[in-house]
């Protein structure tokens, strides 16, 4: 396994409006200083693959993947979304990455009930069928561009809970759509990440490692706080300081023979470089890489 990081660890997400982003060159330099080998793409980085590759190679970094939201719950959106992400897959392939990570697009309703999802908050049968069909078409498209597709269960979307993960995996072709388990988002949605790694060993194509603050999660479950506010308050702490069994997760990855990238994610911490270093230290000490 190899250790990567992501721009979201510097607050690079349009939902995190309280964050002042550093120039991308500073962000990349700090990734290297913290000891990571690769990063994921974000539109903050250069969109010219040659420029991007040069910026990364100068620092000894690799481009691993990309995180993007995609709305495929309605067949009327499929053509436009697939065309948009075909272009992203081409950029990724040209810059050296082999995985496109996507999540179902967040909605105000699901952001508001994240962590507290009830059956009435879930998709209809028609929407599940459309989502599965859209992901299969997208996976076929990205594969044509030399990039595999991995679905990322995410709080605030219609693929958050274990029931929803199981359903979307059942609706998609294992040859076209893999899984990017995010340990923090799975825990946020009430799932056991270790069991997800075990149950979907053959479909784990990429991994995001994240922790969740127990006290804030308990407050969230008993209140009406939405996902973005929870992030601002620090729902995702440094690795090893929360409630997720990260040691068990890393052991499960070794047990199932995973040998890909493990990308650390801690959304918008107050001191990104310090947290990046601490999280990298955790991987060395606990994960051995």
Image (cartoon, rainbow, N blue to C red):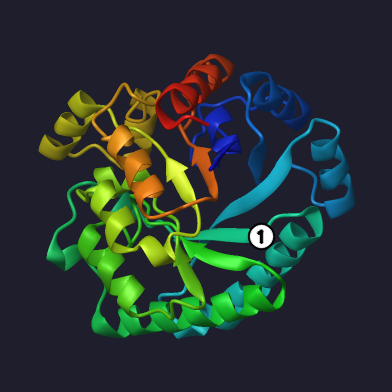
Residue 68 in view in this figure = yes
Q: Choose top left, top right, bottom left or bottom right for residue 58.
A: top right
Query: Quick check: 159 left or right of 150?
Result: left
Depth order, front residue of 170/203: 203
- Residue 90: percent from left, percent from top: 75, 66
Farthest left residue in view: 222
Whether residue 41 is visible: no
Q: Using the image, determine if residue 198 lies above or below residue 282.
A: below
Bin the neighbour count of mark 1 within 10 Å (Cα to Cα): few under 14, some 14-19, many 20 and up.
many
Residue drawn where x is 34% and y is 32% of the image: 211
Q: Which residue is mark 1?
A: 98
Q: Left or right of 76: which side holds 226?
A: left
**Which residue occupies 52% across, 78% down?**
77
Question: Tag 1's secondary structure?
Answer: loop
**Can you give x and y, in whole percent of width and height, for residue 66 in the image?**
61, 53
Residue ID at (47%, 29%): 288
For residue 88, above or below residue 13: below
Vertical comparison of 59 with 102: above or below: above
The residue located at (30%, 85%) in the rendering is 126
- With 63 as the anchor, is 14 left or right in this view? left
Where is residue 200? Give x, y as percent. Answer: 33, 63
As drawn, is 285 to the left or to the right of 47?
left
């Amino acid at each position: 396994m190899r250790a990567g990081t992501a721009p979201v660890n510097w607050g690079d997400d349009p939902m995190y409006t309280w964050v002042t982003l550093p120039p991308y060159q500073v962000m990349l330099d700090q990734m290297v200083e913290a000891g990571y080998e690769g990063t994921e793409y974000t539109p903050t980085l250069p969109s010219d693959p040659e420029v991007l590759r040069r910026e990364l190679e100068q620092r000894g970094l690799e481009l691993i993947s990309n995180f993007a939201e995609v709305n495929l719950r309605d067949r009327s959106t499929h053509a436009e979304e697939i065309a948009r992400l075909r272009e992203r897959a081409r950029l990724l392939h040209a810059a050296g990455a082999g995985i496109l990570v996507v999540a179902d697009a967040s909605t105000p309703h699901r952001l508001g009930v994240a962590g507290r999802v009830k059956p009435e908050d879930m998709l209809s049968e028609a929407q599940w069928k459309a989502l599965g069909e859209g992901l299969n078409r997208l996976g076929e498209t990205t594969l044509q561009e030399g990039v595999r597709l991995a679905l990322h269960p995410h709080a605030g979307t219609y693929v958050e809970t274990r029931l929803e993960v199981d359903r979307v995996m059942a609706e998609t072709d294992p040859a076209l759509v893999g899984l990017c388990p995010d340990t923090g988002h799975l825990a946020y949605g009430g799932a056991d990440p270790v069991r997800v790694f075990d149950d979907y060993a053959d479909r784990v194509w990429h991994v995001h490692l994240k922790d969740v603050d127990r006290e804030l999660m308990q407050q969230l479950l008993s209140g009406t706080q939405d996902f973005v506010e929870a992030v601002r308050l620090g729902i995702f702490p440094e690795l090893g300081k929360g409630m997720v069994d990260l040691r068990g997760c890393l052991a499960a990855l070794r047990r199932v023979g995973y040998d890909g990238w493990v990308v650390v994610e801690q959304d918008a911490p107050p001191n990104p470089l310090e947290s990046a270093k601490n999280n990298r230290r955790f991987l060395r000490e606990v994960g051995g890489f």
